[in-house]
Image (cartoon, rainbow, N blue to C red):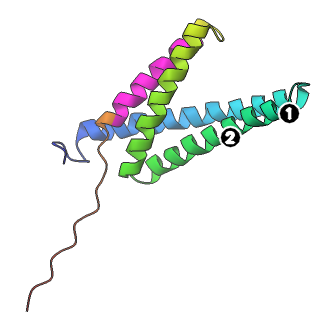
Amino acid sequence: MTSSPADHPRSLAGWAVLRVLLGLESVFLAWVVMVSVLGALRSEGAAVQNVSIVAMAVVSLLWVLATCIGALRARAPWVRGSALTIHVLLFAGGTGCLQLQIGPWWLGLGIAAAAVLGFFAALLARPELPAAPEELPHG
């Protein structure tokens, strides 16, 4: 499948970077959930819009948190795939912040840079595949 094993130094470095990034992204998303809930409670706008923003923030946090926990517990293939997807979407969000001028420029640039770093870390991280069962002797 791959040319480098899961315990290769590049793979181990990729997993280390991925774990740190996913941890930081989880903390950042917890803050986003808190700000979204407080903003929804103070808002006099449409309740459906407020609920959808809070729900999106909560679902995003749960997804990144599940991937972070998976990366901390095991180097499973699903964690790598999830991290790749998260960082592709994060890059879209960062470039969207830059293009639409949502917030300061350094925030969009930081999000895009974290996305690129996470994407390449996920590419380097090789999953540990379960060992193939030993064949039984034919008798």
Query: Visible in this render: residue 75?
Result: no
Residue at 18 percent across and 42 percent down: it is: 4
Q: CA distance from mark 1 to mark 2?
A: 16 Å
Quadrant hosting residue 137: bottom left
Q: Which mark is residue 92?
A: none
Query: Visible in this render: residue 132?
Result: yes
* Residue nearest the viewer, comparing 59 with 25: 59
* Residue nearest the viewer, comparing 126 with 9: 126
> Does the segment drawn in magenta span residue 121?
yes
Q: Is residue 99 above or below residue 86?
A: above
**Region of the chain picked out in magenta, as a range:** 107-122
Residue at 47 percent across and 50 percent down: it is: 70
Left or right of 54, for residue 97: left
The residue type indicated by label 2 comes to Val
The residue type indicated by label 1 comes to Ala
Query: Which structural element holds mark 2?
Result: helix
Q: Where residue 9 sits: x, y (%)?
A: 25, 39
Mark 1, mark 2: which one is toward the viewer? Answer: 1
Q: Return the residue found at the far left.
A: 139
> Does the segment drawn in magenta span residue 77?
no
Q: Quadrant of the C terminus?
A: bottom left
Q: Which mark is residue 47?
A: 1
Query: Which structural element holds mark 1?
Result: helix
Q: Which mark is residue 58?
A: 2
Mark 1 or 2, nearer chain start? 1
Q: Residues within 10 Å of mark 2 (few under 14, many from 20)?
A: some
Q: Return the residue found at the far bottom.
A: 139
Q: Where residue 18 sits: x, y (%)?
A: 42, 36
Q: Where residue 40 sits: x, y (%)?
A: 83, 30
Left or right of 133, for residue 59: right
Residue at 39 percent across and 38 percent down: it is: 16
Q: Is residue 47 above or below residue 110?
A: below
